[in-house]
């Protein structure tokens, strides 16, 4: 279960308030709390020792250890290194003014940690651990509008394509290389292949995959039922995966009601879990691995 801290992104608190909320220690840049199941990491720009830096939306965060080569064992570097599998939530604070801690949101590893070289507290060059982190709280909120717009454009564009006869092709589930994102009106959009969506609809016989008995209607200019393609794992989170999410294994055919319920409705979790359980094996074949708890987090952020 997600830890409820009650903080908003950009909110400024004191060190004592941070400790009280997260039930963690009051010193150091990495503070583990077994009580709350969290690891608070602090990027302190008022102190020159650690060279943390943001590049392309990823924070390259330096591990703990002031002198000598940094190690994983015996400290919180290992907690952060294993955070994608150990269930510990990572929460980031930045300090740009002394004694003022700004909450930045929950973060997770975006890439494999690696070792680099930096000066230690004695001015001696040493090896340090670098943890590439992405802000998953901000990521979800930023991309909701852009991806909903893309969903609408996709539904409209399907009318311009020749529809497939039901199951008149061989469905092959395999990994697909990711396309590069594009910027539209300062929003990041992940390209969608319209024919891939059509194939997913055809394979579902143009019926709702939540329940094939759900009412639909015949398209105005096509002799098939009107259903809508929905990316089960939102394309907004493509940066978390090594393979493309725009594949048939990740696209479900839905009636309008179910599609809107997943985006806007109360109780969407039941539908989401049903679809996830039906597709998780195919997702693995497409090199897409995501626990259901993480999928829920994605939808909560959207």
Image (cartoon, helix red, strand yellow):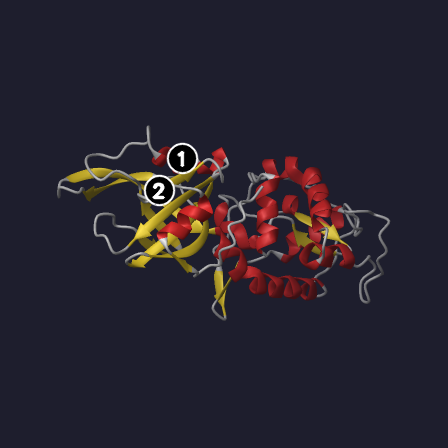
- In the rendering, at what x and y percent does residue 11 appear? 44, 60
Which residue is situated farthest in the left direction here? Answer: 123
| Mark 1 crowdedness (10 Å alpha carbons): few <14, some 14-19, many ≥20 | many
- In the rendering, at what x and y percent does residue 245 appear? 57, 48
Instruction: Please give left or right for residue 202 compared with residue 23 in the image.
Output: right
Instruction: Please give left or right for residue 63 compared with residue 222 in the image.
Output: left
Q: Quadrant of residue 161?
A: bottom right
**Mark 2 or mark 1: which comes first in sequence?**
2
Q: Which mark is residue 265?
A: none
Marks 2 and 1, how far apart at CA = 10 Å
Which residue is situated farthest in the bottom direction here? Answer: 185
Badge 2 marks a residue whose secondary structure is: strand
Q: Which residue is identified by label 2? A: 30
- In the rendering, at what x and y percent does residue 249 appear? 65, 43
Quarter of the image with the C terminus is bottom right
Quarter of the image with the N terminus is top right
Q: Looking at the picture, tell me which residue is in the foreground, 141 or 236.
A: 141
Residue in view at x 62 percent, y 40 percent: 292
Q: Which residue is identified by label 1? A: 79
State whether residue 69 is above or below residue 180.
Answer: above
Mark 2 in CB contact with mark 1 (< 8 angstroms): yes
- In the rendering, at what x and y percent does residue 122 appear? 13, 41
Instruction: Please give left or right for residue 74 compared with residue 246 in the image.
Output: left
Badge 1 marks a residue whose secondary structure is: helix
């Amino acid at each position: 279960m997600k830890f409820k801290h009650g903080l908003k992104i950009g909110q400024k608190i004191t060190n004592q308030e941070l400790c009280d909320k997260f039930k963690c220690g009051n010193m150091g840049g990495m503070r583990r709390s077994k009580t709350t199941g969290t690891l608070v990491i602090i990027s302190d720009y008022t102190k020159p020792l650690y060279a943390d830096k943001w590049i392309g939306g990823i924070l390259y965060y330096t591990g703990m250890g002031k002198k000598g080569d940094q190690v994983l064992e015996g400290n919180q570097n290992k907690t952060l290194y294993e955070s994608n599998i150990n269930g510990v939530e990572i929460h980031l604070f930045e300090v740009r003014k002394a004694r003022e801690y700004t909450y930045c949101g929950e973060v997770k590893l975006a890439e494999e940690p690696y070792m680099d070289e930096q000066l230690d507290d004695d001015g001696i060059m040493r090896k340090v651990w670098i943890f590439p982190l992405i802000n998953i709280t901000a990521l979800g909120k930023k991309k909701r509008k852009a991806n909903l717009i893309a969903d609408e454009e996709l539904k409209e564009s399907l009318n311009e394509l020749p529809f497939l006869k039901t199951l008149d092709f061989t469905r092959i589930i395999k990994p697909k290389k990711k396309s590069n994102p594009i910027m539209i009106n300062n929003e990041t959009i992940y390209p969608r292949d319209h024919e891939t969506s059509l194939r997913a609809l055809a394979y579902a016989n143009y019926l709702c995959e939540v329940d094939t008995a759900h009412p639909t209607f015949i398209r105005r200019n096509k002799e098939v039922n009107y259903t809508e393609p929905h990316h089960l794992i939102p394309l907004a989170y493509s940066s978390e995966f090594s393979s493309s999410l725009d594949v048939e294994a990740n696209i479900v055919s839905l009636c309008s009601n179910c599609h809107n319920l997943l985006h806007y409705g109360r109780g969407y979790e039941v539908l989401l879990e049903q679809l996830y359980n039906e597709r998780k094996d195919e997702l693995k074949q497409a090199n897409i691995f995501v626990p259901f708890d993480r999928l829920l987090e994605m939808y909560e952020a959207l």
